[in-house]
Amino acid sequence: MPALVRVEHITKRYANGTLAVDDVSFCIKEGETFSLLGPNGAGKTTLISMLSGILTPTDGDAFIGQHSIRHAPLAAKRLIGIVPQDVALYPTLTARQNLTFWGGMYDVHGATLRARVEEALDIVGLREHADERVETFSGGMKRRLNIAAGLLHHPRLLLLDEPTVGIDPQSRRRILDTVKQFNAEGMTVLYTTHYMEEAEELSHRIAIMDHGRIIALGTLEELRHLVGEHESVRMTLRETVNVEAVCEHLRHIADIRHITSTDHQVVALVPDAAAALPAIVTHLSRYHVPISTIEIERPDLEAVFLHLTGRSLRD
Amino acid sequence: MTKPARWNACVPTKPLLCSSSPPLSHTLFTNQPERASITIVTNPSRPISSTVVRAIVARFTDSLNLSMAAGSLLFSTLAQQKALPTDETALQKLGETWGEAVAHAFTQPRTSRITFVAADEQERPFDPMAYFAPSMAIFALMFTITQGGTTLLAEREQGTLQRMLASPTPLATILAGKIIGLWLAGWAQLAILLSLSALLFDVSWGNPLAVALICFALVVAASGWGVVIAALARTPGEAQTTSIVISLLFGAAAGHFFPRSSLPIWLQQASRISPNAWGLEAFTTLISGGSLTSIVPHVAALLFMAELLFGVATIAARRQFAA
């Protein structure tokens, strides 16, 4: 399948000297859902802003279809629908008025626009609230309308920048299902998130970003292979425990390949969790460390990120 | 406490015309002191009332001077015609009689006077509304327009500007839409205020084409300040505060609250950087009977100011928005 998006050595350095995106290259095939996964500040939003023409790259170029974002930005923008990270709507207008305005910005007018507005309201399930002002909406409803505003011109590529941040689980579920539905209908999706579960659920391929660079790219299985056959042993400790001290003790266990801690959790990467578990428990008992729960997990993107950077995705 | 100000108005003592006849001062004020003075004591903190009193006294002394000049002319002509009595007592008697007649004429309210009116003009009495109506219209306009310029910053803060920039609508179209919207709001506001003041307070604004020209140039120049503020400020709050301060300063310096002539000369000149000063002067020129050509310099100045400000705003915006 041909590439709809081609990113070639794109770099962004801000006026204050911050290098937000550093020599990034990748392709997205037509009909693919491609996720950019990384912690906050990894450069995902800057990358999406460059692809959508909001920011100009310092170096490199990207092509949407055959159109360069540097040399034919308006033609490239016609193929893109963008759903920004923050809700970008007019709060004092109704949902329908907002969609009508944004449709106009994409040169959709008249009867076509009216039909598209109704269609978009149906897709995100807001037709009943079409004539209510956006300022009266819940966070989840605003997010869904934010997505609808990116669909009015039937884009070939939909850019979704962390669309589920700060919303309730029900709205989140609905958004993820909507994205899957778009992709099933043939739309190409570029999805950024720092939730590994979303990337795992939605994506054909995933690029892991950190400090402005892509540090790994592939399917979920390909990324898991990067960690090897290691499994994770996740231990939740009581709040009174000094987690750093526990990590120090556990590093003496030969089977543990890598160890990290977040809040009151310690995650140890081991080749065989069942074999390593007795040694871990014995060690913790010796130091009288109270354990609340222990979970064994197959390698996931968290483990991949941990393996590649030595840090947790949520750090 | 402010020190009272004093002005002296002096009655001239030398004859206005020289002739073989006795000087007029001798004729009229034989038993009067040679120098009379009027001292006006005013409160400097109330410049308007002091200006009014000074104007009344100046009018009185002007009338007096005019009467003396007329008397001198009359008596010198009579002397040349050898129509005056040669006897000094008779001459003094004639002078006193004439002086009394003139004084009596001044006390009569309906005495006919000669009024100078230019051929193509009509005399217009001072109408406070004709001054304050344009003053307040321009003052309100500056608030609206400079505040309106901050909408771009507000859009950036709520993310809608970025979304617009991601659309295939060119940046020039987006900015033109914003500016034209601002202009339409400004013109509508001026049209409402000018029409209401004409209907309710009977203010005659003068040539409609000239009024339209002033409104156009005024709104364009005011929007220039709006975009400069928007381009230099970092947040909508900062822009809003700046635009309020600038509107107040311009309003005060341009004479919206008290006559510009009562301000220091340097401040009067400095107020020329504001659309308020040019606009107010243009409107008052029209209201006082000025023609279309008389407001052309004001309109040209306002449009030049707009061009300059839009240039500054473009440079400042490039610096601020360059990411």
Image (cartoon, grey):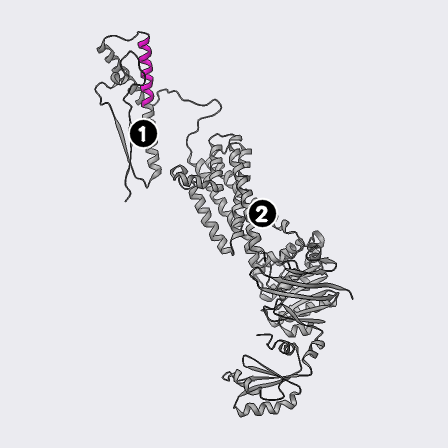
Q: In this image, A258 relative to B16: left or right?
A: right
Query: Residue sitting at 55 percent across and 87 percent down?
Result: A249
Q: What residue type is labelled 1?
A: Val
Residue B249 placement (x, y as % from top left): 43, 46
Query: Residue sitting at 33 percent across and 37 percent down?
Result: B49
| A292 versus B250 height, above or below | below
| A15 versus A304 height, above or below | above
| A155 versus B101 height, above or below | below
| A79 versus B184 height, above or below | below
**Quadrant in which the N terminus of chain B is drawn:** top left
Q: Which of A168 and A210 is in front in this view?
A: A210
Marks 2,1: beta carbons within 8 A: no
In this orientation, does residue A13 appear?
yes
Q: What residue type is labelled 2?
A: Ile
User: Quadrant of the rendered structure where residue A81 is?
Assistant: bottom right
Q: In this image, A211 relative to A32: left or right?
A: left
Residue A14 placement (x, y as % from top left): 58, 61
The disc label shown at residue B57, or none: 1
Q: Does the magenta stretch include residue B76?
A: yes
Callout 2 crowding tier (Cα within 10 Å): few <14, some 14–19, many ≥20: many
What chain does mark 1 sit on? B
Q: Range of the magenta residues?
A: B64-81
* Residue placed under numbered mark 2 in the picture: B179
**Kind of element beneath mark 2:** helix
Residue B7 placement (x, y as % from top left): 29, 33
What chain does mark 2 sit on? B
User: Quadrant of the rendered structure where residue A132 is?
Assistant: bottom right
